[in-house]
Image: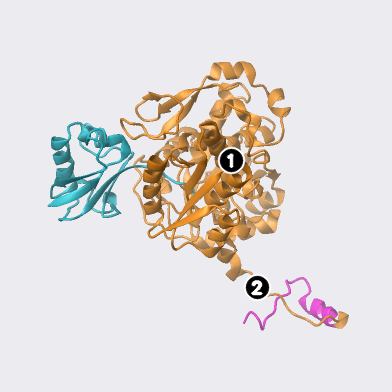
């Protein structure tokens, strides 16, 4: 599957300044691994040593938080948009 | 004179210079302002604080500002109401309500965090201030921006109630409605903040913004006679205020302004959106996001970014957390209004109801000091309580009609049976 990944500002130094990149993968986990292959160092920012997503990183597939889907095994399909977003709260 | 030494990541400890950044470049953890407490200890005394005007800048040594503030001059120092009638109703001896429903200028605790954030924005040279919000925050940012003469952009989800849109629109910011939910709006705002170099009070200015919440805790302690409350119940939405109240108490002890006495902190949430209370009950610090379903919209954040810190602060203080139903929230609003004459919005109703629950559970003892944290004003959310307010009886302007009505009603409230049938 080919998907678009939106890259937050702090990670753009790994992607030559690009704010969106295209990557292959069938699941979120695979996408992260493939991103790291193409842009070394990226995975370490997103995941802990044990491979789980860092506490303050949110990942979305077409706007859905992966924690409401299947976390790292969440499936993706062609044309999906993945967003990597630092956890920000808001006021209300 | 400022005692700020920089910013530091709460997760990995990485240090940064003061700037409009809120996220650690390495681990995405939140950044927090650091202070030289030793130096503050030598300078900040009770007498010094008491000599200052009754506003939140009273505690300026513990706030991240360098210059003389020009806004928020009437914000903070809200009443700490001794709630004897509510205490009697709940069966406790010593109860207070910290009443931010009357905060200036926009009637919520948000005036604290916004005063600090906008003061910092001015110091850092920003000309446009902004936020993503559905209610109290937008009202506050618009109001303060108007007073400071700054350009202001408010970003809202497109399905927002008209009342809330008007409550910010009156100050004439530029309001942009986004097709999506609140989380979509927040995501977009992160990108706008970065591209346009605007000060988003709760995004790129977040470390300074959150420091303003400490003033709620400073005031409670000062108003109790420079003493920490034995128990304080705080509503939890995004998770800003509870950890900062805890931090405020710790800082007051560190700089020698209060004695180090136990103070248990409790998180109050609505049953329809209680990710933090759920984690506390599971004895876990892992927050599982929820989809909110509650009338308490101002605290309906299903994925609170600072939720982890709420759990940690509650745990460290020996407190707990509880959630209540929407019915109990409305009852809480009525109870506070009828016993103490304070009209709060659903977040406050939640806190009252949770306090009642914690007392009934025996978690909060009946003979220790308790503070209920009210953070917003009921007049902004009247549609929530409207169904429970009966229509009054109508009579002609004749004394005889009133005599008849009064005789029939006796001690009971006079309601129009026909109109309410």
As helix, strand or loop, the secondary structure at mark 1 comes to helix
> What segment carries the magenta color?
B401-421
The question of residue B413 being in magenta is answered with yes
Choose top left, top right, bottom left or bottom right for residue A35: top left
Residue in view at x 70 percent, y 79 percent: B416
Q: Which residue is mark 2?
A: B390
Question: Is B146 drawn above or below residue B49 in the view shown?
Answer: below
Question: Is B355 drawn above or below residue B74 in the view shown?
Answer: below
Chain B colour is orange
Please state the horizontal and vertical placement of residue B114, each as a whole percent of the image. 55, 41
Dot 1 or dot 2: first in sequence order is 1
- Asked whether the residues under marks 1 and 2 belong to the same chain, the reply is yes
As helix, strand or loop, the secondary structure at mark 2 comes to loop
Q: Residues within 10 Å of mark 2 (few under 14, many from 20)?
A: few
Choose top left, top right, bottom left or bottom right for residue B285: top left
B290 on left or right of B75: left
Q: How is the image coloured?
A: by chain
Q: Viewer-proximal residue, B52 or B398?
A: B52
- Chain painted cyan: A
Does residue B354 show up? no
Does residue A26 show up? yes
Residue in view at x 46 percent, y 27 percent: B18
- Residue B112's tag is 1
Instruction: State the separation of the CA atoms marked 1 and 2.
Output: 35 Å
Please state the horizontal and vertical placement of residue A90, each as a whole percent of the image. 45, 46
């Amino acid at each position: 599957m080919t998907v678009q990944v939106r890259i937050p500002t702090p990670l753009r130094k790994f992607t030559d300044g690009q704010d969106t990149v295209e990557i292959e993968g069938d699941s979120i986990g695979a996408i992260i691994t493939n991103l790291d292959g193409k842009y070394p160092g990226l995975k370490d920012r997103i995941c802990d040593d044990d491979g789980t997503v860092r506490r303050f990183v949110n990942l979305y597939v077409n706007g859905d938080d992966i924690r409401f889907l299947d976390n790292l095994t969440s499936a993706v399909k062609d044309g999906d948009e993945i967003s990597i977003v630092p956890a920000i709260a808001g006021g209300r | 004179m400022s005692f700020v030494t920089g910013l530091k990541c709460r997760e990995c400890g990485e240090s940064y210079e003061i700037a409009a950044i809120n996220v650690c470049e390495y681990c995405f953890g939140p950044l927090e302002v650091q202070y030289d407490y030793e130096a503050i200890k030598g300078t900040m005394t009770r007498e010094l604080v008491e000599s200052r005007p009754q506003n939140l800048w009273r505690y300026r040594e513990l706030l991240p500002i360098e210059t003389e503030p020009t806004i928020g001059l009437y914000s903070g120092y809200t009443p700490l109401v001794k709630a004897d009638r509510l205490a009697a109703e709940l069966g406790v001896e010593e109860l207070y309500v910290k009443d931010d429903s009357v905060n200036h200028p926009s009637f919520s605790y948000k005036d604290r965090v916004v005063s600090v954030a906008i003061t910092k924005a001015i110091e850092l040279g920003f000309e446009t201030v902004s936020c993503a919000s559905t209610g109290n925050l937008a009202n506050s940012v618009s109001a303060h921006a108007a007073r400071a003469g700054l350009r202001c952009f408010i970003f809202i989800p497109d399905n927002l109630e008209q009342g809330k849109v008007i409550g910010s629109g009156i100050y004439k910011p530029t309001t942009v409605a986004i097709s999506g939910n609140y989380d979509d709006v927040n995501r977009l705002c992160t990108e706008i903040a970065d591209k346009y170099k605007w000060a988003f009070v709760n995004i790129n200015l977040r470390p300074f913004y959150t420091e303003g919440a400490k003033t709620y805790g400073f005031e409670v302690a000062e108003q109790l006679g420079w003493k920490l409350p034995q128990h304080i119940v705080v509503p939890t939405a995004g998770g800003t205020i509870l950890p900062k109240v805890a931090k405020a108490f710790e800082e007051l002890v560190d700089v020698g302004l209060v004695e180090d006495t136990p103070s248990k902190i409790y998180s109050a949430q609505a049953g329809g959106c209680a990710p933090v209370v759920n984690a506390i009950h599971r004895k876990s610090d892992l927050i599982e996001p929820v989809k909110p379903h509650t009338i308490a919209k101002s605290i309906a954040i299903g994925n609170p970014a600072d939720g982890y810190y709420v759990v940690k602060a509650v745990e460290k203080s020996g407190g707990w957390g509880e959630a209540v139903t929407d019915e109990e929230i409305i009852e809480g609003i009525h109870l506070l209004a009828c016993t103490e004459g304070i009209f709060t919005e659903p977040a406050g109703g939640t806190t009252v109801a949770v306090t009642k629950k914690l007392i009934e559970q025996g978690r909060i003892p009946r003979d220790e000091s308790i503070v209920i944290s009210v953070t917003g004003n009921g007049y902004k959310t009247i549609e929530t309580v409207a169904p429970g307010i009966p229509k009054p009886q109508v009579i002609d302007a004749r004394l005889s009609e009133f005599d008849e009505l009064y005789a029939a009603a006796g001690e009971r409230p006079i309601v129009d049976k026909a109109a309410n049938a």
